[in-house]
Amino acid sequence: MRKILYYALACCVALFASSVNIYADDDDSDSFGARLSGEVDYKIMKGMHVYASEELRFFGGSDFIDRSYSELGFSYKINDHLKAAVSYTAIAVNKKEVIMPDNEEITLQWTEWRHRVSADLTASVKVGQWRFSLRERIQGTYKMRELNNYQQPQMGWVLRSRLKVAYKFRSVPFEPYAYFEPRLLLNGAKWSEESLGKNYENASFLGHKDVYFNRYRCAAGLEWKLNKRNSLDFYMLYDHLYDKEIDARKEGSIKGVVLKAPIHGISSDRLSLGVAYKYSF
C-alpha cells in the first residue's frame, strides 16, 4: 500500500510540475493553470457526511498562488437517486498591482477575501456500469471589498447546472468521467438599451436584474480508488468565460449615475490541470 501511495504522489508532482512549466512559458499566463486539493470526508451515519477541503489554484507563474478555497460542507443522501448538500467556502484571492511613482516601479500584493455559500441537489441513475447525474447548485459569493455596484453586485448569485457521466470498471479501481456545466449569473448590473449603442450617455441603471450565462465548463477526469479510505482524482477543465465590461460612476446629484463607455461583452478561455486527494472514514 505504501508503494502505491508513493507512486500516486509522484504522479501528482509530475502533473503539477508539467502544468507549471506550460503556463510559466506562456505569454498569456491566465490561460493555463493548475489545481491541487485535499479533502477529508467523515461518515456521521448512513447517507450523512460532513467534509472539509482545501484547494490551491496556481496562475500567472510557478511562484504565485492565485487563490485558495477552504470549504466546510454537509451532505445527505435522501435515497438511491437523490442527494442534497450545503457548504461554506472562504476564498483568499491574491492580488498584484504595479505602480510607478516618480518613475520607480513598485509591485503591491494583497489578499482579497470572499465568502461563499452553496446549496445543491443531485439526481443520479445507474445503467449497467454507467452512472448519469444532474446537479443543480445555487451559489452566492460576497466580496469583502468596496465595489462599484453600478458595475457588479456586492453579493453575486449564480446557478450552476452540471450534467455528468461516469463509467465504473468491474475489475480495476478506475472511474473515468466527463461533465458539462453552464453557469448562469442571476443578478448582474443591468442598464437600459441605450448602453449598447452610441447613445450610451443617456443610459439609465435598472438595478441588479441582468441574467446571462457567464461561463461554460467542460471537464474530463479519472478517479482512482487506492483503497477503502484513500482516492485520487486527475482531471482537466476547460472554461469559456464571458462577461460584460461596464464603466460607470456617479457624477454629482444632477447627472447621477452615468456610463463612461458603451457596454460590450468580453470573453476568454482557460485550461486547468488538477489533482485532488480524498480521505474517507
Image (spheres, rainbow, N blue to C red):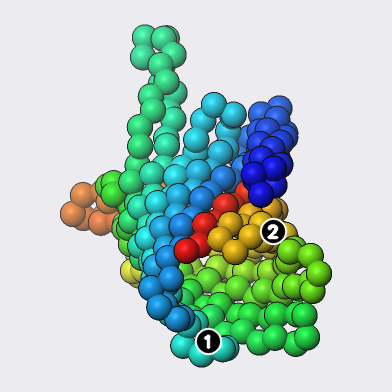
> Could you say which is closer to the camera, residue 196 or residue 102?
102
Q: Relative to residue 249, is residue 228 drawn left or right?
A: right
Task: Name the residue: 40% across, 78% down.
Answer: 45
Q: Which three-letter amino acid code belongs to the residue tagged 2?
A: Trp
> Could you say which is closer to the camera, residue 29 or residue 167?
167
Mark 2 secondary-structure assignment: strand
> Could you say which is closer to the camera, residue 261 or residue 172?
172
Give the crowd class for mark 2: few <14, some 14-19, many >=20 residues within 10 Å. Answer: some
Task: Name the residue: 79% across, 74% down.
Answer: 170
Point out the residue furthest to the front here. Answer: 1
Query: In this picture, is 242 found above or below 24?
Result: below
x, y percent for residue 81:
57, 88
Query: In this picture, is 138 found above or below 11?
Result: below
Q: Which residue is mark 2?
A: 224
> Could you say which is closer to the camera, residue 98 or residue 95?
95
Q: Which of the two labelled residues, at mark 1 and mark 2, occupies the earlier sequence position?
A: 1
Q: Could you tell me if residue 272 is visible in this image?
A: no
- Quarter of the view holding residue 219: bottom right
Q: Which residue is mark 1?
A: 82
Query: In this picture, is 77 found above or below 278?
Result: below
x, y percent for residue 24:
66, 29
Task: Name the residue: 56% across, 39% down.
Answer: 58
Q: Relative to residue 206, is residue 265 drawn left or right?
A: right
Mark 1 secondary-structure assignment: strand
Point out the residue furthest to the left here. Answer: 253
Q: Relative to residue 24, is residue 115 drawn left or right?
A: left
Give the crowd class for mark 1: few <14, some 14-19, many >=20 residues within 10 Å. Answer: some
x, y percent for residue 251:
26, 48
